[in-house]
Image (spheres, rainbow, N blue to C red):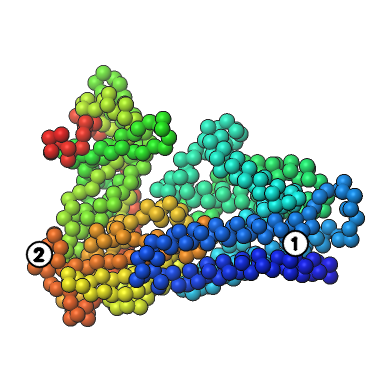
């Protein structure tokens, strides 16, 4: 044990400058996590630069980690059993223990403490902090251990860098293509890549998380075995073979894994609390035809047909949104059947302004008068999708349309109510909402709020949301709606859609971590706009009894409906173009 501490002391001394730089970047990351919100709220340039700053800090940390590990291992290079000076008086087990202790004390533990401080300062519960510990440790080890393995089979930094870059090139550029074309290993044919990028279908995304976690844990265990093997035997060629085997085994098990154990919500079905007997109507007088972008110069152009849809038979308090269109097809008189590509319907951003949502909001507000409702009459729903060439052959041709439409049903519920004053805060186990500032203006008031949500991998009480989905989310989504209401006058104003689009999505942790996501929202509540006239003025007196409330749409059920229309056709152009005579 004395030898372990002697080597550890020597490594800390020789790498002291690199360790100092490492702690500087850890401190910078912690300061950003604690102060970024307050620094950016009144500085638009800093606010817009935050994603880049977090990215630079995160990448710099990874590069520093790789360099420190290289110098650490190469100080006592594992050159193999054939070297004439192999008889140096350092036990192989002591050498391994000293290097791994250095990594734990210098790279892992300070980073863990820093992230715990940031999460605790942002008002997350002790239970969530405990759930974050294994996630953070796994995230660090899955990066550090492979770097240690790579350093153990190389002699100098140049070799280490060349082999590392070569591996990244193979893994990042070549592997996705081979997996997608199913020519690399038969086991990869069991899953489609579409399952792994589908953020609208929670089951597939949650299953992906479970399979990834199994692959990561297995790869970490195998990497540790390979690392110990190299330290104790120094058989470099055999170690290289074990590295390839470990990589193939981990990925093979991950792709084959089908048990979704990580998130309890993935298997829990929402109970239907509404009458599933509904009437659906599709209106070809209101149609929108869109082009779906596809990657690659030779990719087929895809046409998506969207129409106005109306669902009747439910109370006004319920909202129905088309989640998915299945088995959509056109059956023509000549016996030909045109089948739509499989697709999930995406809820339009503009659905916030749908008249149905205004009715539902008014029911939740009860005796409060909604002063500035939106007047949008409908939103479009996806019903058909096919290549542009096929679309051009069949557009305008009359046939029978058949499909199974799957609707999600929501109901608004009052979620948060805060006095409309600066520094008011709402916190629960996994969320923190605060009013940062209230700016009065001639046509109303702007309230700056910050939303902080936990996004822990091991938190089974809520879904884990991908960064791509966070980037897609808009503040004018129907899922949550902010209103400013006066308790004395019984009046309420909706936040304007136009300004809600200005939303900053930040990660207060490093760029590749999502344990805490943050949105800064400027909410405009205006008594002067293009939609309404003669509204009460939002002045100092009106704000005395005002509170900011948030309504959240809770899913209460789902309905599947088979529809059939005997005289239906795929329109040649959108209804807006028809109205203009184009």
Q: Is residue 152 left or right of residue 292?
A: right
> Residue 577's x, y, as percent?
17, 37
Which of the image's four quarters has the N terminus? bottom right
Crowding at mark 1 (Cα within 10 Å: few <14, some 14-19, many 20+): some
Q: Tell me which corner region of the image, top left, top right, bottom left or bottom right, holds residue 451.
A: bottom left
Q: Secondary structure at mark 2?
A: loop
Crowding at mark 2 (Cα within 10 Å: few <14, some 14-19, many 20+): few
Comparing 449 with 545, the one in front is 449
> Residue 174's x, y, as percent?
57, 37
Which residue shows up at 19% across the image and 29% down it?
567
On screen, residue 154 above or below 60: above
On screen, residue 539 above or below 132: below
> Given the current orientation, which residue lies at the most extreme top position?
334
Q: Secondary structure at mark 1?
A: helix
- The residue pinned by badge 2 equals 533
On screen, residue 176 above or below 477: above
Which residue shows up at 16% across the image and 55% down it?
375
Residue 20 visible to the viewer: yes
Residue 99 bears which disc, if any? Answer: 1
> Residue 325's x, y, as percent?
33, 40
């Amino acid at each position: 044990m004395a030898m372990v501490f002697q080597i550890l002391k020597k490594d800390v001394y020789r790498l002291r400058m690199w360790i100092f730089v490492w702690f500087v970047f850890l401190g910078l990351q912690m300061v950003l996590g604690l102060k970024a919100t307050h620094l950016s709220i009144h500085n638009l340039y800093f606010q817009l630069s935050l994603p880049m700053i977090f990215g630079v800090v995160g990448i710099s940390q990874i590069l520093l980690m790789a360099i420190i590990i290289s110098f650490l291992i190469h100080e006592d290079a594992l050159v193999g059993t054939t070297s004439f000076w192999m008889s140096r008086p350092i036990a192989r087990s002591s050498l391994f223990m000293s290097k791994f202790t250095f990594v734990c004390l210098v790279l892992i533990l300070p980073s863990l403490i820093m992230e715990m401080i940031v999460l605790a300062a942002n008002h997350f519960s002790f239970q969530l902090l405990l759930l974050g510990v294994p996630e953070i440790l796994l995230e660090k080890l899955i990066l550090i251990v492979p770097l240690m393995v790579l350093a153990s089979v190389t002699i100098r930094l140049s070799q280490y860098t060349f082999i590392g870059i070569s591996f990244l090139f193979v893994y990042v550029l070549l592997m996705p293509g081979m997996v997608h074309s199913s020519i690399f290993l038969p086991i990869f044919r069991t899953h489609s890549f579409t399952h792994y990028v589908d953020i609208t279908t929670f089951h597939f995304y949650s299953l992906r998380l479970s399979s990834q976690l199994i692959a990561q844990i297995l790869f970490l265990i195998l990497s540790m075995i390979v690392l110990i093997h190299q330290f104790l035997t120094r058989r470099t060629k055999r170690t290289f073979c074990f590295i390839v085997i470990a990589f193939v085994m981990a990925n093979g098990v991950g792709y084959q894994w089908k048990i979704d154990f990580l998130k309890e919500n993935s298997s829990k079905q929402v109970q239907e609390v509404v009458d599933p007997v509904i009437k659906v109507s599709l209106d070809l007088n209101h149609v929108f035809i869109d082009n779906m972008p596809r990657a690659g110069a030779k990719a087929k152009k895809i046409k998506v047909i969207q129409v106005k849809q109306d669902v009747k038979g439910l109370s006004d308090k319920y909202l129905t949104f088309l989640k998915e269109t299945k088995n959509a097809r056109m059956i023509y008189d000549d016996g030909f059947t045109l089948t739509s590509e499989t697709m999930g319907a995406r809820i339009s951003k503009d659905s916030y302004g749908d008249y149905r949502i205004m009715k539902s909001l008014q029911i939740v507000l009860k005796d409060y008068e909604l002063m500035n409702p939106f007047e949008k009459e409908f939103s479009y729903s996806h019903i058909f999708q096919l290549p542009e060439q096929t679309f051009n052959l069949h557009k305008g041709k009359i046939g029978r349309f058949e499909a199974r439409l799957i609707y999600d049903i929501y109901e608004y519920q009052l979620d948060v109510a805060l006095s409309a004053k600066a520094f008011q805060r709402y916190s629960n186990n996994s969320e923190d909402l605060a009013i940062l500032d209230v700016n009065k203006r001639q046509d109303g008031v702007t309230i700056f709020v910050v939303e902080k949500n936990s996004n822990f991998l091991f938190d089974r009480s809520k879904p884990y949301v991908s960064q791509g989905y966070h980037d897609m989310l808009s503040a004018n989504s129907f899922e949550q709606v902010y209103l400013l209401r006066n308790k004395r006058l019984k009046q309420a104003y909706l936040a304007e859609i136009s300004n809600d689009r200005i939303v900053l999505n930040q990660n207060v942790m490093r760029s590749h971590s999502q344990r805490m996501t943050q949105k800064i929202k400027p909410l405009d509540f205006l008594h002067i706009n293009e939609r309404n006239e003669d509204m009460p003025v939002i002045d100092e007196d009106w704000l005395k009894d005002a509170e900011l409330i948030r309504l959240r749409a809770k899913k209460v059920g789902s309905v599947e409906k088979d529809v059939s229309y005997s005289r239906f056709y795929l329109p040649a152009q959108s209804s807006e173009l028809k109205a203009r005579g184009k």
